Image (cartoon, grey):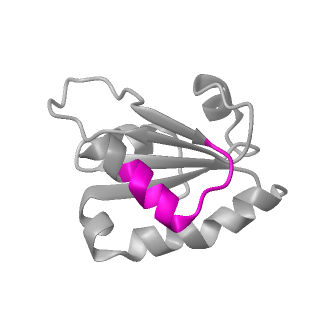
Amino acid sequence: MKNLDHQFIIESAKTHNVLVDCFATWCPPCKALLPVLESISEDAFWSQSLKIVKVNIDDNPSIATRYRIQSLPTLILFPKLKDLDEQVVEIARHIGGISEKALTEWLHLHLD
């Protein structure tokens, strides 16, 4: 998992589907989501096709504004770009906590 900015999201989408975790260090549900995201990032199936990018909205307020983040945690899913000239476009969003089972089902729903 990486903790970076919008440019990293764009670069990551050139090679992988991208799951952006918008979080804050003071947010208890965000802290509860961390082990779920770590487990998925270490899973052999997901590690080949999905890059998880963590964005601390307190450190990156422009990202919060760009993606209209109003609640935490917010997960935003971007597909792998088919054409490098293509724009990165959100395909799904989840707001709030989520179990690992529910998250993997959500990912399969939007990426299969």
Whether 47 is among the magenta residues is no
Residue 25 visible (yes or no): no
Residue at the image position 75 percent from the left and 58 percent from the top: 29
Image point (24%, 65%), residue name: 48
Residue visible at 50% across and 47% down in the picture: 20
Q: Residue at x 60, y 73 (%)?
A: 35
| Residue 60 horizontal/vertical position (percent) | 67, 40
Please give left or right for residue 15 compared with residue 38 in the image.
left
Q: In the rendering, at what x and y percent does residue 84 appear? A: 18, 31
Res. 22 visible in picture: yes
Whether 20 is drawn above or below 41: the answer is above
Give 101 or 63, whichever is nearer the viewer.
Answer: 101
Residue 81 place in picture, x, y as percent: 22, 35
**Percent coordinates x, y for residue 88 in the rendering:** 35, 29
Please indicate whether residue 84 sits to the left or right of residue 101 in the image.
left
Residue interval drawn in magenta: 95-107
Residue located farthest toward the left when viewing the structure as drawn = 83
